[in-house]
Image: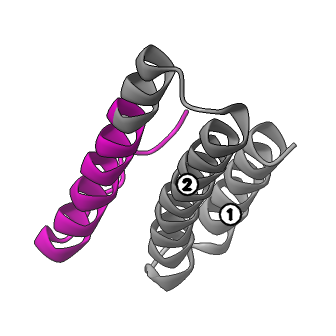
């Protein structure tokens, strides 16, 4: 199973800031759709959301990798975590 990732207060603050930016961007898209903004502008807003979501995913992956590789795990535990990370990469980075 997936191991809970302990985040430092700084990491949590960064992640929450990213999520709040995404929420703001999604709200702007909702407003744009309601107001009938041209498709080209709407696509640009959606692309920005996709980029922000990718950045959030990258930050979470990086924290998980640092946690796994920087810990004091035995070789067998480290190998199991590596398999988990590879499964996550395959699942989310299609």
SS for callout 1: helix
Quarter of the image where the C terminus is located: top right
In the image, is 11 to the left or to the right of 35?
left
Q: Can you identify the residue that label 2 sits on? A: 57
Mark 2 against mark 1, which lies toward the viewer? Answer: 2
Q: Where is residue 61 in the image (x, y as percent from the top left)?
A: 56, 62
Residue at point 54%, 72% (across, down): 62
Q: In this view, does 9 lie to the left or right of 42?
A: left
Magenta residues, dominant SS class = helix
Q: In the rendered structure, which segment of residues is drawn in magenta? A: 1-27
Point out which mark residue 76 bears.
1
Q: State the SS at label 2.
A: helix
Question: What is the distance, in whole Å, between disc 2 and disc 1 at their CAs?
Answer: 26 Å
Q: Which of marks 2 and 1 is nearer the N terminus?
A: 2
Between residues 76 and 15, which one lies in front from this camera angle?
15
Residue 15 is left or right of residue 38, and the answer is left
Q: Residue at x 45, y 69 (%)?
A: 63
Q: Which residue sits at x=54%, y=30%?
A: 37
In front of the other: 52 or 64:
52
């Amino acid at each position: 199973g997936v191991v809970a990732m302990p985040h430092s207060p700084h990491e949590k603050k960064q992640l929450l800031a990213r999520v709040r930016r995404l929420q703001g961007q999604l709200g702007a898209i909702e407003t744009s759709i309601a107001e009938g903004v041209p498709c080209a502008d709407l696509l640009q807003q959606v692309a920005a959301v996709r980029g922000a979501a990718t950045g959030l995913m990258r930050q979470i992956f990086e924290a998980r990798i640092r946690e796994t590789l920087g810990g004091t795990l035995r070789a067998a535990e480290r190998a199991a975590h590596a398999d988990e990370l590879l499964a996550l990469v395959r699942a989310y980075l299609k």
